[in-house]
Amino acid sequence: MKKYAIIFFLIIGFEQISFSQKKIYTPKIQYCNCNFKIDSSYLATAPQQLKADSLFQNKIDSSFKTQCGYLIVPENRKKANARMIKLPFIILKSKNPNKKNDPVLFTSGGPGNSSLGWINGIDKSSFINDRDCIAFEQRGTRFAIPYLRLFVLDSVMKEAYRKNLPKDSMWLIGVNLYKKRLLQKGVDITGYNSDETVSDISDFLSVLKIDSVNLYGGSYSGGLMMAVLQKNPTRVRSLLLDSALPTFVPIDEDEPVNFNEALDVLFHRVEKDSLNNPTYENLKEKFSNYFTSISNKKFYLPYYDSITNKMLNIEYGKNELLDIIVNNMGSYASIKTLPFIMTDIIKGNHPVYLKPKMDRFFRANTAPDGMRMTVSCADQANYNRQNVMKQVNKLYPYMEGYHINDVWKEVCNCWKVPPVDVNTKTPFYSTVPVLTGNGAFDPACRPMYMKLIKHYLPNTQAFLFMNRSHGVGGKVFFEMAQQFLDDPFKKIISTDANIVEY
C-alpha cells in the first residue's frame, strides 16, 4: 500500500511540474497608427535601400477608415518563459452601413513575404464594398517585431562569386553565421513555423471576436489558410486560394517534377507554333541534351563589379543558367520570351543573360530571410524522403546538383529546428466552400494541387488559367472572387476561353 501511495504522489508531483511549465498567455492587441516601421534593431547593418524602405508606404484612400495595431503573442507557445512578439495588421473598414460581418483576411506567401502592402489596392476593389478587409503580417516578416532578416548570407555569397569559391559550401557557411547572429539577438528560431502562425491567426480572430471570416492566401499562404481552417472549422466561412501549396504536399520532392511539367506545357505550345517555323523545333530535346552536356562544365564571365570597382572573371555553370530559366517561368510575360532565351543559351550566348543576373545579385540582397528558412525546414525538409529525392534526380539527370529551392536539406541540417506537428502535414476533410485558381505554366505549385484540394474540400470551385503562371491574380480572378464571396455555394461560370473549370 505504501508503494502505491508513493507512486500516486510521484504522479501528482510530475503533473504539477508539467502544469507549472505551461504558461497560460492572453493574446493582446496594441492599437497604433499605420506608419509601421521595420524593427530598428535590424537596420544597423542593413543596406541603404532597406533603410530607405523601412517605413510602410500607406497608399490607402484617406476617405476610408483604417484600424491598425499589433497582435502580441508568445514567440514560442511551447516554452513557458517565451518572450512576446508583435505582429502588425491593418483593417480597412467598409463604408457600407449594411456591411457583412465576415471580413476578408489576407496574408502573403513565400514563406517570408510581407502582407501589409496588399491592403493598398483593396480600397479600389469590390471586396471593400460589402465587408472589411484585413492584411495580417506573419511573424518574422518585414514589419513584424522581430524581423528575421540579416544580410550575412548575402555578403558571404557575394564574396563567393568575387573569389570563385565553391557556392554550396559558402552558402552553408553563410547559413551558420546567419543562425548564430539571430541567436545572439535573442531570437528563438524554433518559434517560427506554420503551426505558430496558424495559432497567431486563430488568436487574432479570437481577440477581435471575429466569428466568421473569409481567408485569402496564395502559394505558401494558400496552404497556411487551409491549416487555419483545419484548426478553426466553425469560424471560417470560405477560402480564396491562388496557386495554393497545401501544407500536406511535399514540395521539395515535387518541385523539380513540377518545373519539368510546366516546361512540357511550354514545349508543347512551342511545337504547335513551330509547324511553319523550325526555329524552335525539338526544343525540349535540345534543352535537355544541352543542360546534361554542361553538367560539369565551368564558364567564365568578364564582369565589372561597380561596388568594389574591380574587374572580375566570374565562374559560373549549369546552375546559374538554370536559374535564368526557372526565374523566367515565374510570370507569363517572361515565359513568352523563354523559347528564344533557351535557344540563345544553347547556342552559347550566355553573357547577355548572365550580366543582368549578376547586376541584380550584387546590387540587391536576394538570399532568403530567417522566416523562410525556418518555415521551409520545419514544414518541409524535416519531412523530406531522401530516397525520393534521388529518384527525382534519375528522372531529370540534368538537374542533379541544382537547388530549385534556396532552402534544402543541408541548409536545414545547419538550421536545426523541430518539425511542425504531424497533423499539420496530414490531409483533412471539410465542407467549407473554396475558390481556387492556378496557372497552366506554374513551375512550383502545379494545377494538380487543385485536384487534391477539391478531393479533401469537395465544395471547391477550381479554375485553370491557361495563360498564367504562379499567382494568377488580376482583374478576372478578383471578379470571380467577388461572385464567390457574394454566394460561395453558387456555381461560377467562366466566359473566358482561357479560364476553364478544372
Image: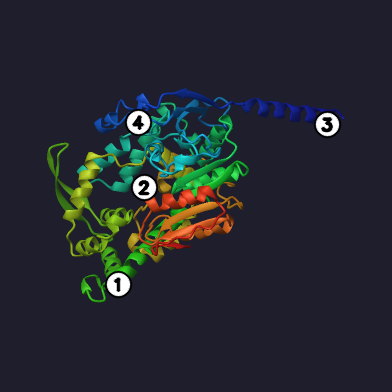
Q: Earlier in the sequence, mark 2 or mark 4?
A: 4
Residue at image position (36%, 53%) is 404
Q: Residue farthest to the front?
A: 97
Q: Which residue is mark 1?
A: 271
Judge by depth and name the residue closer to the eye, 92 or 114: 92
Callout 2 crowding tier (Cα within 10 Å): few <14, some 14–19, many ≥20: few
Amino acid type, label 4 = Phe
Q: Are marks 2 and 3 in contact (CB under 8 Å)?
A: no
Q: Earlier in the sequence, mark 4 or mark 1?
A: 4
The residues tagged by marks 3 and 4 sit, at their Cα atoms, a distance apart of 63 Å
Q: Would you say 308 lies left or right of 446 here?
A: left
Q: Earlier in the sequence, mark 3 or mark 4?
A: 3
Amino acid type, label 3 = Tyr
The residues tagged by marks 2 and 3 sit, at their Cα atoms, a distance apart of 56 Å
Amino acid type, label 1 = Glu
Nearer to us of marks 3 and 4 is: 4
Q: Earlier in the sequence, mark 2 or mark 1?
A: 1
Q: Which residue is mark 2?
A: 406
Q: Would you say 304 lies left or right of 379 here?
A: left
Nearer to us of marks 4 and 1 is: 4
Q: Which residue is mark 4?
A: 56
Q: Earlier in the sequence, mark 2 or mark 3?
A: 3
User: Residue 215 appears at what percent x and percent y?
Assistant: 51, 43
The residues tagged by marks 2 and 1 sit, at their Cα atoms, a distance apart of 32 Å
Amino acid type, label 2 = Asp
SS under mark 3 = helix
